[in-house]
Amino acid sequence: MRQKLLAVLLVFGGLCGFTMTAKAQSAETTWPTRPITMVVAYPPGAITDTVGRRVAERLSQALNVQVVVENRGGAGGNVAAAFVSRAAQDGYTLLFTSYGNLIIAAAADLNVGFHPWRDLAPVGMIGPMTVVLLVRPGLQVNTLQDFVRHIAANPGRVNFASVGVGSSYHLLIEQMIAYGKLNMTHVPYRGGAAAMTDFLAGRVDATLATLLFARPYMQDNRGIGVAVGNAERSPVLPNVPAVQEVIPGAKLTDGLAVLAPAATPAAIIARANRALQDVINQPAMREWLTNEGVPPRPGPPEAFMAEMTPATEELRKLLRDAAIKVE
């Protein structure tokens, strides 16, 4: 009798397991069947929002369901990231964010309610954001080499604005100070608008801004773009060098990406990644992204993490060696 009961239980358990597996596989192969929420980590008007909305529009067409944008700004993108990390792991809540803040949160072990690389799974990268180093015309420098020489000739007197302590811009400035042995003063602001206001008024000597934000001031000569903070030159500014061409090792790692809750089924991640790559590879989309200062870099989730892991370790070392406290 006991053997018969055990056999029945085993069969019943196997059927339950088969049913659950079949349901999971069915959900993965039919995804998506209803609208997807794409949580954008910054408020309307930011480059993240501008690109996120365009990507969501094209993904809606690629996936044949509506992709709805929901802005959740705050804490440098961490409010949105924490929200998505706790969302249902079914592919219907995605995060659109700049990955620089995720690198910082992981490298500094910030208590933000989630861990970027444990609680989120990459869907794919959009591309790096072009960030321009602007100097005020009054300094009378036209190249990064000139700017470095000016700092050396005026130790402690050059003021460099960032969008806040612990931001990717601040950390690039710290890299320039550490690796270039430069003596300049970091001036943190609460956001890019305040930093740019004082830069244009001549109250600070240099600042960093995305290409989209910096371009008008470069065009009317209110700011001189002497370098880009990225690891490589921008295709939109091919004659403007990367900072690390003059100060080896000084580079900003930031850009835009789509992520999902960590335990989202691999088949859904793969389907979302294929759709994302299809969208980014559309000729008109590639041209638009490049012009916006986000040169497209589509690829699988593994390629994204292949960049994020060493970038996190490099930043962790910088924070430790330069005794930088990020909160």
Image: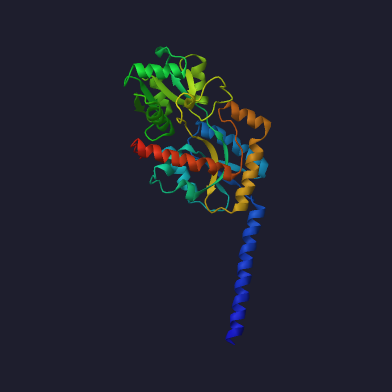
**Based on the displayed image, in which of its 4 quarters is residue 20 positioned?**
bottom right
**Based on the displayed image, in which of its 4 quarters is residue 193 positioned?**
top left
Picture coordinates of residue 284, whole percent (x, y): 66, 30
Picture coordinates of residue 141, whole percent (x, y): 43, 14
Q: Give whichever of 45, 192 is nearer the camera.
A: 192
Q: Is residue 77 visible?
A: no
**Based on the displayed image, in which of its 4 quarters is residue 94 positioned?**
top right
Q: Is residue 270 visible?
A: yes
Above or below — where is 215 with respect to 301? Answer: above
Quarter of the image with the C terminus is top left
Quarter of the image with the N terminus is bottom right
Q: Give whichever of 155, 192 is nearer the camera.
A: 155
Q: Give whichever of 230, 116 is nearer the camera.
A: 230
Residue at the left extreme of this rendering: 156
Picture coordinates of residue 276, whole percent (x, y): 62, 41
At horizontal 62% and vertical 80% (from top left) the residue drawn is 7
Lateral position of residue 79 relative to residue 264, left or right: left
At horizontal 61% and vertical 40% (from top left) the residue drawn is 299
Q: Number of callouts in the render?
A: 0
Lateral position of residue 183 relative to residue 81, left or right: left
Q: Give whichever of 32, 162 is nearer the camera.
A: 162
Picture coordinates of residue 293, whole percent (x, y): 55, 27
At horizontal 54% and vertical 39% (from top left) the residue drawn is 257
Q: How is the image coloured?
A: rainbow
Lateral position of residue 3 relative to residue 146, left or right: right
Above or below — where is 74 with respect to 157? Answer: below
Residue at the bottom extreme of this rendering: 1
